[in-house]
Image: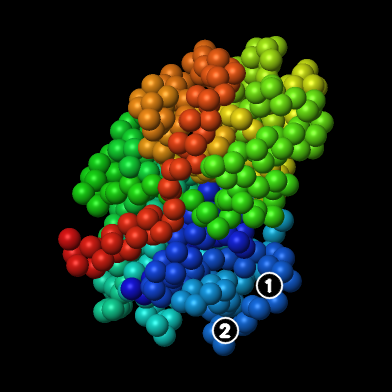
Amino acid sequence: MKILVASSEVLPYSKTGGLADMVGALAKFLARAGHQVGVVTPLYGGLREKLPGLRPLDWNLDLPFGSARVAGNIWTLEPSPGLTFYFIEQKAFFERGDLYQERGFDYPDNAERFVFFSKCVVHLARYLPWQPELVHLHDWQTALAALLVLDQKLREGWTAAPLVCLTIHNLAYQGQFPAAKYALTNLPDSYFRPEGVEFYGLLNCLKAGISYADQITTVSPRYAREITTEPLGCGLDGVLRRRQHVLLGILNGVDYDEWKTEGNPHLPFSYTIKDLSGKQTDKSALQRECGLPEAPDIPLFGTVTRLAEQKGVDLQLAALQEMLAGDMQFVLLGSGQREYERGYRRLAERYPSKCAVQIGFDTGFSHRLEAGCDFYLMPSRFEPCGLNQMYSLRYGTTPIVRLTGGLDDSVIDISEDADKADGIKFIECSVRALSKAIRKALVLYPDKPLLRHYQRNGMARDFSWETAAAAYASLYQRIRAGQ
Ligand code: ADP
């Protein structure tokens, strides 16, 4: 099929979170399976210099934008056969230090930036010579494009308009803006109502996608069910229940070209499911790198995360204050809310020989942490899919996760099925429940044969993107067939 994927971030060119991993891998694996794939994404600052292969398209964008017009350029890159990236250059909007925020605050013109970007997506969908049959939108930054396609189909007679699929990566981020920003869309007022894009007097970009896309997906089956309920529906559960007949959960895959324990340039030592000795040396190397005592027999726990309430990092901080008094070590890599950054720094000061904290974003270190730890902590309040628990499984690092969303779909608890078990799950969202799960890990740790059994079960799991991309491809075919 001919598919245009639209996302505000995509690996290997930009990333703040799992969205970039997912879109980069989905596009790559769809193209590998023989589909024609275009990816439209902003040209952020620094990319021009980093990508000498970029070519300008002879195509100047000049789009209506409220009462004004905004211009832009398109640059392309073809990293592999069947896969073309279209980078939207709009210096005032996209050449910034970061993607969405500055010093913890959203850019004040995010509505302008992503309404414009959504318009570019639709413009490409309409005028690209290869005529995409389906546009796959991701998250609120592109969701408005679903309505723009529909409107152009109805008002301008766009006869070969593509089908639209929207994937929700995190319902908590909806792109809500004051009603006055709706004028930027140049859409008729009739869509600005509760059944359309209005949410209690605000413009809600994600709601536009949910209301008007032909198909909605989210990144795990359990999260697809959870978001239709009030506790995890973020105010949109009613709208999602109305559209439940077109809502499907597909678990994200893992890009094993990147996340591998053999021949991985980020890891000092390789290891395999048959020979885990390299994991032990990766552990020593990590302890050394973090300035912790090189102690092979002390269980080492780790986390790589955005420091946000969603991730349960506050519960984890409270649990570790107490648990680190015992015989264990902990390493954190993360960045985000200042209060949590401060809290974890203080934890490391309190336990200098047991706890190391690195604030920042560092892909290489995230691999070394995943490989060097014995246990991986992920106590999320909610988790649409979560990737690190799946990376942990492949790296033989037993995940300890809260039973929610994709964490529940991807980890098998040691009490569920001993032959297949690969992690520790806990249910209650509390410090007590997390501490209890950590204690379970501490009890398990000295039983090396049993721990190895769980590690090997995890390493044998297959979350490859071939499977996930095939699930999307067959969904696209079903939408096309109108089923
Ligand atoms: P989310 O998208 O909600 O942040 P996911 O688990 O879906 O969570 O994806 C997070 C991705 O970002 C993973 O690939 C993870 O390794 C990566 N990541 C998060 N924080 C950091 C960091 N500080 N340094 C490097 N990688 C990080």
Q: Nearer the viewer, residue 208 or 373?
A: 373
Residue 323 horizontal/vertical position (percent)? 64, 14
Q: Is residue 163 left or right of residue 5?
A: left
Q: Quadrant of the N terminus?
A: bottom left
Q: Position of residue 43 (x, y in %)?
A: 62, 68
Q: Secondary structure at mark 1?
A: loop
Q: What residue is shown at x 18% (from left), y 64% (from top)?
A: 482
Instruction: Between label 2 and label 1, give the one nearer the viewer.
Output: 1
Considering every residue shown, the one lying at the far bottom of the view is 58
Residue in the image at 26% along x and 66% along y: 477
Q: Amino acid at mark 2?
A: Leu
**Lateral position of residue 170 relative to residue 51, left or right:** left
Residue 51: numbered disc: 1
Which of the pair 17/281 is nearer the observer? 281
Left or right, 118 with respect to 79, comes to left
**Callout 1, which amino acid?**
Leu
Residue receiving disc 2: 57
Q: Position of residue 419 (x, y in %)?
A: 38, 30
Horizontal side of residue 116 vs 297, given as left or right: left
172 over 302 or under it: above or below: below
Q: Residue 3: x, y in percent?
A: 38, 71
